[in-house]
């Protein structure tokens, strides 16, 4: 059962990855430049501002944790954040 963390490089993502090892060894860390937290982590580099990358990054996942922040100063930050959340909710 693969558990995927989108936005895994942040403080919350790192702590979540540590905690999840109590329940699974199949943890996929997704960010632009993911770094291993646990020895068995699966790293998946991806630009999550691109919708198609989001879908590729969650393929085969049983559980997805969305820890993404889009700042309003980012180009199209609010629009991308809304569209991404909307697409993820449609998968449920």
Image (tube, grey):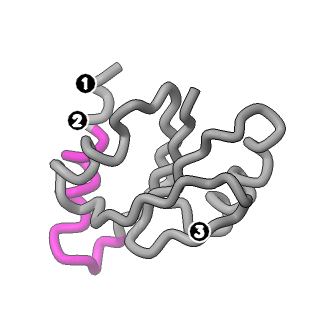
Compared with residue 67, is residue 10 higher up or lower down, i.e. above or below?
Answer: below
Which numbered circle lies on residue 60? none
Q: Which residue is mark 3?
A: 10
Q: Where are the magenta residues, as a range?
A: 71-85
Q: Residue furthest top?
A: 92
Callout 1–callout 2 Cβ contact below 8 Å: yes
| Residue 61 locus on image (x, y percent) | 45, 32
Element under disc 1: helix
The N terminus - image quarter: top right
| Majority secondary structure of magenta residues | helix
Compared with residue 61, is residue 4 higher up or lower down, i.e. above or below?
Answer: below
User: Is 65 a magenta residue?
Assistant: no
Q: Quadrant of residue 59?
A: top left
Q: Which residue is mark 2?
A: 87
Give the left or right position of residue 83, taking residue 48 as reference. left
Compute the Cα span from label 1 to label 3: 25 Å
Element under disc 3: loop
Compute the Cα span from label 1 to label 2: 5 Å
The C terminus - image quarter: top left
Compute the Cα span from label 2 to label 3: 22 Å
Q: Which residue is mark 1?
A: 90
Q: 77 and 20: which one is in front?
A: 20
| Residue 62 locus on image (x, y percent) | 49, 25
């Amino acid at each position: 059962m693969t558990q995927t963390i989108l936005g895994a490089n942040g403080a919350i993502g790192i702590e979540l990855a540590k905690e999840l090892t109590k329940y699974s060894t199949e943890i996929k860390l997704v960010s632009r430049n993911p770094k291993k937290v646990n020895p068995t982590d699966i790293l998946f580099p991806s630009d999550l501002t691109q919708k198609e990358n989001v879908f590729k990054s969650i393929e085969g996942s049983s559980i997805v944790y969305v820890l993404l922040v889009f700042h309003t100063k980012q180009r199209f930050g609010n629009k991308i954040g809304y569209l991404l959340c909307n697409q993820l909710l449609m998968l449920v």
